[in-house]
Amino acid sequence: MATLASRSDIDASAFQSDFLRTLAERGFLHQGSDLSGLDALLQQGPASAYIGFDATADSLHVGHLMSIMVLRWFQRTGHKPIVLIGGGTTRIGDPSFRDTSRPMLDDAQIAANMAGIGRVFAKYLSFGDSPASAMPTNAVMVNNADWLDELRYIPMLRDVGRHFTVNRMLSFDSVKLRLDREQPLTFLEFNYMILQAFDFLELSRRHGCRLQMGGSDQWGNIVNGIELARRIDGTDLFGLTTPLLTTASGAKMGKTAAGAVWLNAEKRTPWDFWQFWRNTEDADVGRFLRLFTELPLDEIARLEALQGAEINEAKKVLARE
């Protein structure tokens, strides 16, 4: 499987599709599987792609915003974004690159969290007003509990589990780092990567979805889905990831001394949200303008070239956009 190790390897001019060219130009691309094949697919007409969001809180935060912007650009360049809400997988919790298990949530908490994070996407994506106004590029929102809750354990082990070797699962960094630190990984959590792979297979069957996207920590899970669909259905699927985003000073994006920078207004006021972007470090202004706004690249180049006190004007533009 061809992969790209870092953005420095990626030449935007190599892509013919508007989507991949836009992502490369703006710094979204980190890893990809068969990007030449994906580039060709995207030129054939509207394609479908998904990103999954588990309902671990009642709002998403700024750390999720890059993934949301990727879905927005996917739609803006003529394709169909699928928002997968993990009503099923939230019951397990993604163990990727975590030292401890996530708190177990009951069904009522998960339902409330799903309602909260679902409201965010209407601000970024077009879902269409009704089925009668359906367009090939209208976004859809799906819940993986719709198929995961119906699975029977023994058939799942026979049909899906036989395609996963424990040796391979232990080789993924998301698992290996946890074990290297001698932190417990429960059998429940160990199943997460199988269920996420099954999500990709199921979405390819139900919605013709050919592409899964996500943060760089999801690469192993995405690869599993690609391989599972090839083995079971003989379907060629694709994956790409965005880079782990940190500030110029090394802080994790979306985290402040006061806590997470939530996207829902009832959890963080629009004024405080504006202030978060207004206080961006000087060295991050150009990068954040490319990732989190839709300003033309030549205008971004002008803004990031400002020096001294004038860079504050660029920060105000970033916050407003």
Image (cartoon, helix red, strand yellow):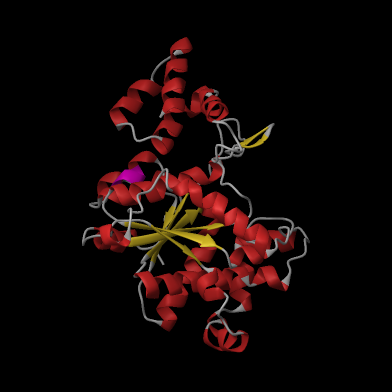
All told, the count of numbered labels is 0
Which range of residues does the magenta coloring cover?
Answer: 20-24
| 71 sits left or right of 106 in the view | left
Q: On the image, which quarter does residue 304 sit in?
A: top left
**Secondary structure of the magenta portion, mostly?**
helix
Q: In the image shown, does 167 or 84 lie closer to the viewer?
A: 84
Residue drawn at the location 35% of the way across and 46% of the way down? 23
Q: Is residue 108 above or below residue 306?
A: below
Q: On the image, which quarter does residue 235 sit in?
A: bottom left
Q: Residue 48, position in %: x, y?
A: 34, 62
Q: On the image, which quarter does residue 266 sit in?
A: top right
Q: Is residue 303 visible?
A: yes
Is 42 magenta? The answer is no
Q: Residue 188, position in %: x, y?
A: 69, 71
Residue drawn at the location 56% of the way across and 81% of the way down? 151
Residue at the top extreme of this rendering: 309
Q: In the image shown, does 3 or 64 lie closer to the viewer?
A: 64
Q: Is residue 135 visible?
A: no
| 248 sits left or right of 126 in the view | right
Q: Residue 170, position in %: x, y?
A: 64, 70
Is 21 magenta? The answer is yes
Quarter of the figure with the N terminus: bottom left
Residue drawn at the location 56% of the way across and 34% of the way down? 247
Residue drawn at the location 31% of the way across and 25% of the way down? 299
Q: In the image shown, does 89 or 18 lie closer to the viewer?
A: 89
Q: Residue 51, position in %: x, y?
A: 46, 57
Q: Is residue 306 above or below residue 243?
A: above
Q: Is residue 235 above or below residue 81?
A: below
Quarter of the figure with the C terminus: top left
| 225 sits left or right of 25 in the view | right
